[in-house]
């Protein structure tokens, strides 16, 4: 477990060259895959490919025919389940099986992906190669889920602190929605950029991006899953090349963005969990320079997050309808049309259909399991409420959520410990951009090891 921006990709790239090994990397997002492929190509490696929907039929056919010649193969868990992909991979000699963002395996994690649960069986079909699971945010419970699902018997666990000491933490308590917008505008105009503002609402992200483009001197664009794919790629490239000062985004933005000079992360809405919060603020300061996280909090903001959570839960009626047609429907689309389930709800129910088979009242049993998940997710929202309302050190609270026990004393910690906000005023963008080489990353990892930044569990 390595914190965001600390060089997780180096953990499989370096062994690949030392062992002359072919590596299969399972990745959850198209943008993340594309970014990783481009980064490897920039460094001179041409034998790399991402098997995803960006490939044309002809490109995909050619890629599968020559799959054994690639050194790095990136793929989504959904694509791995296709018969033609399994057949093509059987001709390869995969010696390292990498699961990126491995917390997606756990049903208790914030980014649960049911398709990740097939990875243990797929690994065995590939001959059980050495397996590397990577994540920046996983509690003890989620790490145990990962090991069980990937069939990793007594694995070495290298656990790095989630603390990012160069990111100062601040919560701004506000009394009205209009004050929240006014405060956001002040921060946009004065704080160091490039930066990202996270919203729970696509509509609000669009509206405020447009408004602040007109009323400030900053270059701002919104970004979310509702935009066309080519538009999202364009906005991402503009941000990466410092053509934009700020991105107003939903959680759809960030995981695939390798930008080292992001200075400020602002949350307009309360994140759904501490894991999501740590992932998102961790996109700042990857160059090691001082950066800032601000969470704008209005009393009862957690109700918005809770309401969004409730939308994830299928009703007992929908679960019963799913049970009736799950074996006869032609596919996910037909089930969604007949039951009113969302794609996420549909996939979750398919997951339970595979593992929960011996119950006379299947719908009632699954409903109880989903309610249990909802209780856990509400507990995570409560953790975020504690974070914004605490009178104690916010950094200490974060690491405690990840089962860390070490005390943290550092300058520029959080607003409760005290730090000068004026240190983060002004633009520290492209003119101070710092290039981080793989040698720097490797040296940093081993330096942390020497300084007891790691714990190794056997």
Image: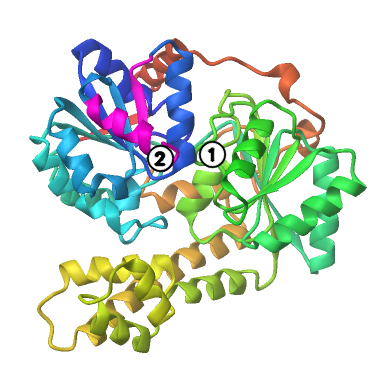
Q: Which mark is residue 153?
A: none
Left or right position of 251 against 202: left
The image quadrant where one finds the C terminus is top left
Q: Looking at the picture, how far across and down is residue 256, in whole percent?
A: 50, 37
Eyeballing the image, is 368 above or below 187?
A: below
Residue that label 1 marks: 282
Picture quadrant of residue 6: top left
Q: Looking at the picture, how far across and down is residue 326, in whole percent?
A: 24, 76
The image quadrant where one finds the N terminus is top left
> Which residues make up the magenta segment?
46-67
Eyeballing the image, is 131 above or below 358?
A: above
Eyeballing the image, is 425 above or below 216?
A: above
Q: How many marks?
A: 2
Do the CB atoms of the residues marked 2 and 1 lie less than 8 Å apart?
yes
Eyeballing the image, is 14 above or below 102?
A: above
User: What residue is shown at x 10% (from left), y 36% (from top)?
Assistant: 128
Q: Is residue 47 magenta?
A: yes
User: What residue is shown at x 76% (from left), y 35% (from top)?
Assistant: 245
Left or right position of 98 against 392: left
Residue 407 versus residue 19: which sits nearer the camera?
19
The colour mode here is rainbow
Q: Is residue 143 magenta?
A: no
Left or right position of 455 against 177: left
Residue that label 2 marks: 136
Can see residue 387? yes
User: What residue is shown at x 27% (from left), y 75% (from top)?
Assistant: 329
């Amino acid at each position: 477990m390595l914190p965001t921006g600390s060089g997780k990709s180096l953990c499989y790239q370096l062994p690949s060259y030392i062992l002359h090994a072919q590596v299969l990397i399972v990745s959850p997002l198209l943008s993340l895959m594309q970014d990783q492929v481009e980064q490897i190509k920039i460094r001179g490696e041409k034998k790399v490919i991402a098997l995803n929907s960006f490939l044309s039929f002809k490109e995909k056919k050619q890629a599968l025919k020559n799959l054994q010649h690639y050194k790095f193969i990136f793929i989504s868990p959904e694509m791995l389940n296709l018969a033609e992909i399994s057949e093509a991979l059987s001709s390869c000699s995969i010696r390292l099986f990498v699961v990126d963002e491995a917390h997606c395996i756990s049903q208790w994690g914030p980014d649960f992906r049911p398709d990740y649960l097939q990875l243990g069986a797929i690994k065995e079909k590939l001959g059980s190669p050495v397996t590397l699971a990577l994540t920046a945010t996983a509690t003890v419970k989620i790490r145990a889920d990962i090991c069980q699902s990937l069939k990793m018997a007594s694995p070495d666990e290298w656990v790095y602190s989630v603390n990012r000491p160069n990111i100062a933490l601040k919560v701004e308590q506000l009394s009205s929605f209009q004050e929240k917008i006014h405060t956001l505008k002040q921060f946009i105009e004065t704080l160091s950029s490039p930066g990202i503002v996270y919203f729970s609402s696509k509509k609000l992200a669009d509206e405020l991006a447009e408004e602040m483009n007109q009323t400030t001197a900053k270059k701002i664009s919104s970004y979310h899953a509702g935009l066309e794919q080519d538009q999202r790629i364009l906005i991402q490239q503009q941000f990466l090349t410092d053509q934009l000062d700020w991105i107003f985004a939903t959680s759809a933005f960030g995981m695939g963005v390798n930008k080292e000079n992001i200075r400020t992360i602002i949350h307009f809405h309360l994140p759904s969990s501490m894991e999501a919060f740590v992932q998102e603020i961790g996109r700042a300061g990857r160059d090691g320079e001082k950066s800032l996280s601000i969470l704008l909090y209005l009393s009862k903001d957690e109700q918005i997050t809770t309401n969004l959570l409730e939308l994830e839960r299928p009703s007992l009626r929908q679960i019963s309808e799913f049970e009736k047609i799950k074996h006869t429907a032609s596919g996910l689309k037909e089930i969604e049309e007949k039951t009113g389930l969302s794609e996420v709800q549909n996939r979750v129910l398919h997951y339970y259909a595979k593992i929960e088979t011996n119950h006379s009242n299947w719908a009632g049993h699954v409903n109880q399991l989903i309610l249990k998940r909802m209780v856990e997710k509400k507990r995570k929202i409560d953790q975020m409420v504690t974070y914004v309302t605490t009178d104690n050190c916010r950094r200490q609270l974060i690491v405690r959520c990840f089962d860390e026990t070490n005390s943290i004393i550092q300058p520029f910690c959080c607003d409760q410990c005290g730090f000068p906000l004026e240190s983060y005023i002004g633009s520290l963008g492209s003119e101070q951009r710092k290039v981080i080489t793989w040698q720097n990353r490797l040296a940093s990892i081993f330096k942390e090891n020497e300084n007891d930044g790691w714990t190794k569990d056997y």
